[in-house]
């Protein structure tokens, strides 16, 4: 098939912004077959495969795209699945623009190939086809425990399962999936998709036990006593950071973690679920990452008339994906750049009524190359709101490190690991994902899960 020389990506159909801002259905509708084949035709199939070097889980990108070009959609999925346990998830939430697509040669003169959209297409085609259950994998007699069923834990479990290990995943919540279930909204990542990916791992032989809080019900020492020969800790970063300003104890002030968990995991946006979620008219979300975008867009869908993103730097410094910023603006979210909160004020009943802010300016770049914000004196003003959501980061829950002797952590509470092997300061205990890095991306957590699985295999098999 001849190379498709169009300069721009094949557009992906989306819900109209005015309609989607009132529902939790998926924003992006996905490629039809002819769209996917057209976009796949833009790939140059470079011999050096620069895009692969940008993928944390080493997906053989030109190979799977070539199969889409020829109409072998299941072959494309199987090529991805060799190194990626969660293709339908990654195709939706990975920051491809900073990873694989940033290396694409087509991006030199035009837009890069839409690798993420094509990955999503192949995965969705596979899931729709409801393929037969995988062939049973011969077991090697060794047992490994995985703590946490988020992207790091699921990836580590999937890779070890392929190698023949008996793998048990212990999940604290009542539903497996970790941040994929409680953190990312339905309109970005449908929960049905997550559960289909998890079902595929279960069908392949991975045992997943929910309502198992490691550090309470069992600790890591007890896992070894039960016969597990290695443990991978992928427990994420679920402890929210707060603003540290007066008024945080007022009603109507919460972390993005709590707000999103109530909506996503506990279905607070659906009338038939008895989940208390405050429905505010005017909402301020403090932060500039993807979590802030998710919280603001959820608040809009929960009926807020006005939603602000309050961020102390400019748009260029925002860590959120450009796509998420673009979608939020389309949906009517108002961005207040170079703005920082200094206090939350309330009424005599204890409810938040306004957010006091100051204007900021950026200083010259420091040694790190980053421009730091500085307060403009006398610029205080109040923003009338009845809900304030803090989305300024998370750190790991201290439960595991405080119940496991010999585990070292850094000043942020993250587990200290060997960068090459991801082994912690305790032999046989490995860790990866947000438990080590702090809050980061799904695909980086998956990359850590893959690396840890390889290290555990080497450790147990010599």
Image: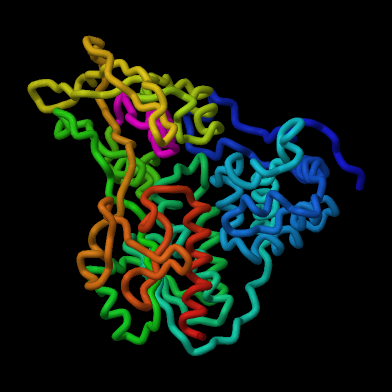
Q: Which residues are magenta?
A: 279-303
Residue 298 sits inside the magenta stretch: yes
Vertically, is 370 above or below 54? above
| Residue 103 pos. (x, y %) | 67, 44
Q: In percent of the image, x 47 and y 84: which residue is there?
A: 460
Position in image of residue 81 (x %, y %): 64, 63
Residue 298 visible in the snapshot: no
Specify whether 303 is left or right of 381. Answer: right
Please provide percent x and percent y for residue 203.
56, 73
Residue drawn at 37 percent across, 21 percent down:
363
Identity of the residue furthest to the front in this view: 367
When the figure is inspected, residue 77 is found, relative to residue 51, above or below; the finding is below
Q: Residue furthest right?
A: 2
Q: Residue at x 70, y 64 (%)?
A: 78
Which residue does the image show at 74% across and 58% down from the upper left?
Answer: 76
Which residue ends up furthest to the left in the rendered image? 348
In the image shown, does 365 or 290 lie closer to the viewer? 365
Q: Nearer the viewer, residue 355 or 262?
A: 355
Q: Nearer the viewer, residue 358 or 4?
A: 358
Q: Is residue 279 above or below residue 404?
A: above
Q: Quadrant of residue 52?
A: bottom right
Q: How has the structure been colored for display?
A: rainbow
């Amino acid at each position: 098939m001849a190379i498709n020389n169009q300069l721009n990506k094949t557009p992906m159909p989306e819900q109209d912004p005015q309609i989607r801002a009132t529902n939790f259905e998926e924003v992006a509708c996905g490629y039809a077959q002819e769209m996917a084949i057209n976009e796949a035709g833009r790939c140059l199939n470079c011999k050096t495969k620069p895009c692969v070097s940008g993928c944390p889980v080493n997906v053989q990108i030109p190979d799977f795209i070539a199969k889409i070009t020829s109409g072998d959609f299941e072959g494309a999925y199987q090529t991805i699945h060799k190194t990626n346990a969660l293709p339908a998830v990654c195709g939706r939430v990975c920051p491809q623009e900073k990873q694989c697509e940033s290396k694409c040669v087509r991006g030199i003169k035009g837009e890069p190939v839409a690798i993420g959209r094509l990955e999503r297409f192949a995965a969705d085609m596979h899931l729709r086809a409801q393929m037969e259950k995988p062939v049973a994998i011969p077991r090697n007699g060794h047992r490994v425990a995985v703590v946490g069923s988020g992207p790091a834990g699921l990836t580590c479990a999937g890779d070890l399962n392929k190698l023949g290990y008996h793998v048990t995943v212990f999940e604290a919540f009542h539903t497996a999936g970790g941040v994929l279930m409680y953190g990312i909204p339905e309109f970005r990542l449908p929960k049905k998709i997550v559960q289909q990916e998890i079902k595929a791992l279960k069908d392949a032989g991975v045992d997943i036990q929910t309502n198992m809080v490691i550090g309470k019900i069992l600790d890591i020492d007890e896992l070894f006593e039960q016969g597990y020969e290695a443990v991978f800790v992928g427990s994420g970063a679920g402890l929210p950071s707060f603003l540290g300003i007066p008024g945080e104890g007022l009603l109507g002030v919460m972390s993005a973690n709590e707000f999103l968990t109530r909506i996503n995991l506990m279905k607070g946006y659906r009338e038939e679920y008895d989940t208390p979620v405050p429905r505010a008219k005017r909402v301020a979300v403090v932060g500039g990452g993807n979590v802030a975008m998710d919280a603001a867009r959820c608040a809009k869908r929960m009926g807020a008339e006005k939603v602000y993103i309050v961020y102390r730097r400019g748009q260029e410094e925002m860590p959120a994906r450009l796509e998420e910023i673009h979608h939020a603006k389309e949906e009517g979210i108002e961005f207040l750049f170079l703005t920082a909160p200094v206090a939350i004020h309330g009424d005599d009943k204890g409810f938040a009524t306004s957010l006091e802010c100051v204007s900021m300016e950026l200083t010259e770049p420091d040694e790190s190359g980053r421009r730091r914000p500085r307060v403009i004196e006398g610029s205080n003003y109040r923003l009338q709101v009845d809900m304030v959501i803090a989305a300024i980061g998370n750190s790991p829950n201290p439960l595991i490190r405080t119940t496991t002797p010999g585990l070292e952590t850094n000043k942020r509470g993250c587990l200290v690991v060997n960068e090459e092997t991801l082994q912690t300061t305790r032999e046989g205990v490995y860790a990866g994902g947000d438990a080590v890095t702090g809050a980061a991306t799904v695909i980086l957590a998956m990359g850590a899960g893959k690396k840890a699985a390889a290290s555990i295999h080497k450790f147990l098999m010599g």
